[in-house]
Amino acid sequence: MSTPVEIIFVALLGYFLALNALYLAVTVAALVRLRQQSGLRYIDYGRMSTSAANLPLSIIMPAYNESTILRDTVSAMLASDYSEFEVIVVNDGSRDDTVKVAVEAFEMEPHDVFHPAPLETKPVRAVYRSRAHPNLWLIDKGNGGSADALNAGLNLARYPIVAHIDSDCVVEPETIARLMRPINFAPEEVVIVGATLRLTNGLQVRDGTIVGESLPARLVERFQAIEYLSAFVLNRLGWGAINSVQVISRGCGVWPKRLLMDLGGFSSDDTHCDIEVTIHAHASLRSRGIPYRIFNVPEAIVWTQVPGTWHDLLVQRKRWQRVVFEMLWKYRRLIFNPRYGYFGTLAMPYLLFYEGLGPFVETFSYVFMAVLAILGALSAKALVVFLCFSFGLTALVRVLSLLADILYFRAYQRRNLVVLAGLALLEPLVFHLAQLPHRMLALVEFLRGQRTHEALTRTAIVSEGAARR
């Protein structure tokens, strides 16, 4: 290779090495934290959840065209083993019969309720309350998006702690108690927590209770099972160790209501409100010098539905990438800013160089290597080194995530582990590469100011199955 080519080759290796080394360091930190917290698996949450000292909780579930799954997900939420909570389902102008399903399934009736509404939302058409479950509410409002629906729920919420949970998510009975444990032990602190998301694809649910688990049928869903293991078991746990989690997923997060109100609620100006409110919280709390903690609770499991087709997946990932560009621009003052601690000096640069610029650097590197191979300028040794740096370390992180699940959580049955291990090695080569073109197209949408939020195809959760093993 000539000198310019060698410089480019070394620069690309340095890029992959630096980012994967950081990713690996975060993974190791997460494994250490898991080891330290291993005793939490043996806590008697059943006894803890009945304590009168627990803080009451308002759970907000935005719903848009969720009639096929709403009965199961709300039933699971109502079955939570926690002393005092309310569930607020917010119908965000659904075009299907979401309201009808909720009213009939939970014996809901119109209810006059007067409450302050400091957060502006689309008009609320009606508020319902369940006769069978007095802690269940339904808000029927015009369509304004998930952030608008969450703000409508915030206006109605009575309790000092608020959780947001997507209406396609199924919770386990102890999930709320597990999420609330760190908050209940530090009620005067600003503590924000997220849950570990798993896939409902493949779940068997009866009346809101999980009765069977198996791997989903489609390959695209199985790749996402591996991806979620890495993202929620290790990645966010590792970033949480240095108080630098970039996003508390909209799928499930728990916040002090007063903080959300101070931040002006959830932003409707961005493609996704979850990453925006998380970064906003970091920026606001650090600038005011308020001590806080933001982290994921690995033992709190929430099951969520993921795209079941490659088309839906790529549409989703293009949208996820677009919001990364939005956040990098909106909060550019945080990048490399030591005033914001590790979040400014590590997390935001990671968001810039890996999540933002990553698709372009990776695509260039693969095209560059292909051209070198065609011209006969690429040695076998150079190719092996490049593959180890670009794919090998990523595959190693995926395998470590699977190992962590085996040792600490056992979410998937033992007979599925071989399949998952094989997919963990293939994921960087197949699943990750397939997303690159759409992630690059997201930059064009961002520059155009596009804010579309394409609806994904929902499928009913399987309602029959063998007893859970």
Image: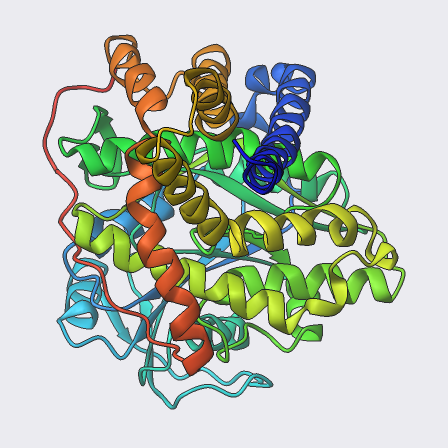
Percent position (x, y) of residue 15?
61, 39
Percent position (x, y) of residue 89?
36, 65
Between 222 and 43, the one nearer to me in the picture? 222
Between 223 and 60, the one nearer to me in the picture? 223
Q: Quadrant of the C terminus?
A: top left
Residue 158 visible here? no
Q: Quick check: 224 above or below 354?
A: above
Q: Quadrant of residue 262?
A: bottom right
Residue at 46% in and 53% down: 360
- Give the image's coloring scheme: rainbow
Percent position (x, y) of residue 185?
74, 38
Is 243 on the left or on the right of 406, as rendered?
right
Is 23 on the left or on the right of 130, as rendered?
right
Residue at 37% in and 82% down: 144
Residue 130 visible here? yes
Percent position (x, y) of residue 166?
37, 56
